[in-house]
Amino acid sequence: MLPSTRPLRLRSLLSLVLRASTMHIGGVATQTWLRTRLVDAGHLRTDDFNRCFAVGRLTPGTNLLAFYTALGHLMSGMRGAVACLSVGAVAPTLIAVSLTVLYVQFSAVTGVSRLMAGAQAGAVAILFWTSAKLLVTTTAERLRPGALVALGALVAVWSGLPPVVILLAAAAAGAFVLGEQT
C-alpha cells in the first residue's frame, strides 16, 4: 500500500484497467479517466500517477500498455504489472479483431461509411474534450507552463500542423520548462 492513500485491491485495479482498455477513447483521455478513479478517489497520489503517466509517454510502443504496467507494478508489485499488462493487451486485441472482421464483411454496405464518418467526428470531439480537461486540471491550482504547452499543442492541431512537428515542438518546450525548474 502506498503511503497516505486508501488501498485498492488488485482485482479492482484490473477492473479499472479492463474498462479503460475497452473504451472507444484512447491515450490521454483514457489516462485522464483513470486519474479520476485513482487519484481523485484517494487510491494513488498525484506524483505517483504522474510518474506512471511519464513512463507511459516515454516508453516506445503502446503507451497505454506501459502506463497500465507501471500502475500495476506501483500498486501491486510484479504480479500487478503482469496482470495489468495482460488485461490491458488482451481485451482491446479481441475487440479490434472482432471489429475488423465485421468491417471487412460489411464495408460495402452504404450505412457503414456514414458510421465511420461519425466515428471520426467523435474522435476529434474526444481530442478536444481531453485537451480541455487537461487544461482545466492543470490550471485549477495555478497557471503552469505545462498548460501553455498543452494549449499550444491544441492550437497546432487545430491549425493542421503535422503531428510530428507538434510532438517535436512540445518536446522542446517541455525541455525548456524542465530546464528552468532545476
Image (cartoon, rainbow, N blue to C red):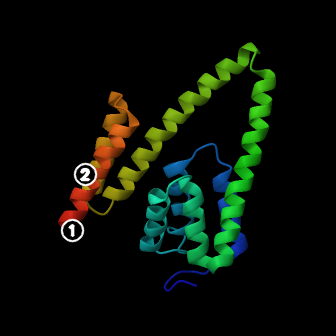
Would you place residue 30 above or below residue 44 in this image? above
- The residue shown at (79%, 32%) is 101
Q: Residues within 10 Å of mark 1 (few under 14, many from 20)?
A: few
Where residue 16 sits: x, y (%)?
66, 62
Q: Is residue 147 shown left or right of residue 51?
A: left
Mark 1 lies on residue = 181
In depth, the one of 136 and 32 nearer the eye is 32
- The residue shown at (31%, 51%) is 171
**How many marks overall?**
2
Where residue 145 sits: x, y (%)?
24, 56
Give amino acid for label 2. Ala
Closer to the chain start, of discs 1 and 2, is 2
Mark 2 lies on residue = 173
Where residue 4 sits: x, y (%)?
49, 84
Would you place residue 35 above or below residue 156 in this image? below
Residue lying farthest to the front in this orientation: 60
- The residue shown at (72%, 41%) is 96
Label 1 residue SS: helix
Residue lying farthest to the top in this orientation: 110
Q: Is residue 22 visible?
A: yes
Give amino acid for label 1. Gln
- The residue shown at (75%, 35%) is 99
Q: Quadrant of the N terminus?
A: bottom right
Give the Cα separation between the discs numbered 1 and 2. 13 Å
